[in-house]
Amino acid sequence: MREGTHPGKRKSFFIAFLLWFFFGFIAAHKLYLGLYREAVRLILLYFLLPLGVVVPAILVLHLLGYRLAPEELRAGDIEALLKSPAFAALTGVVLAVLTAIWIWDFRVLMRQVREHNEAAAREEEGSRKKGGA
């Protein structure tokens, strides 16, 4: 098992799935499996990667002369910003990046639950052999 975690008892894939589905953005499924360092990395990935995509995109738009908002914002400017094609494109890119991370994390989760349960089974078998000997 990675990160020096103690396998302990077997974990339910269904519970890990529910935690991933509803609370994946805060890495609850990683915490459930005892993967604390990986949970921190995933949380940082969920929040920093979209930022790393949006900031350069805004800078490129700015260099091309397209501003998402005027220098001084007025009451109607926010509504206009939300309806602008550039804002919609940036939102789409961020959602695509987050969706890709989420799907990738699900694939990793299936492997991690299996590995955790295999390690727990080996540990149970080892303690049974020690107890029976």
Image (cartoon, rainbow, N blue to C red):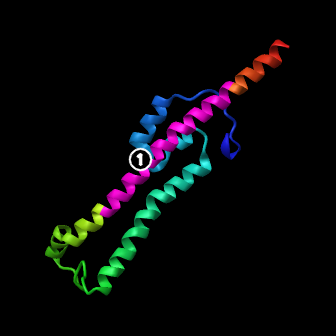
Residue at (44%, 35%) from the top-left corner?
A: 17
On the image, the x and y values in percent for residue 43 come to: 50, 54
Image quadrant in which you'd find residue 67: bottom left
Query: Above or below — where is 6 with respect to 26?
Result: above
Query: Above or below — where is 119 with respect to 45?
Result: above
Image quadrant in which you'd find residue 68: bottom left
Q: Under tag 1, what secondary structure?
A: helix
Give the residues in magenta. 93-121
Name the side, left or right, on which 16 lies relative to 130: left
Q: Quadrant of the N terminus?
A: top right
Q: Is residue 64 visible?
A: yes
On the image, the x and y values in percent for residue 83 come to: 16, 68
Residue at (49%, 47%) from the top-left corner?
A: 27
On the image, the x and y values in percent for residue 31 come to: 56, 42
* Secondary structure that dominates the magenta span: helix
Tell whether position 115 is magenta: yes
Residue at (28%, 85%) from the top-left corner?
A: 64
Residue at (54%, 43%) from the top-left corner?
A: 30
Tell whether position 13 is magenta: no
Q: Residues within 10 Å of mark 1 (few under 14, many from 20)?
A: few
What residue does disc 1 label?
Answer: 103
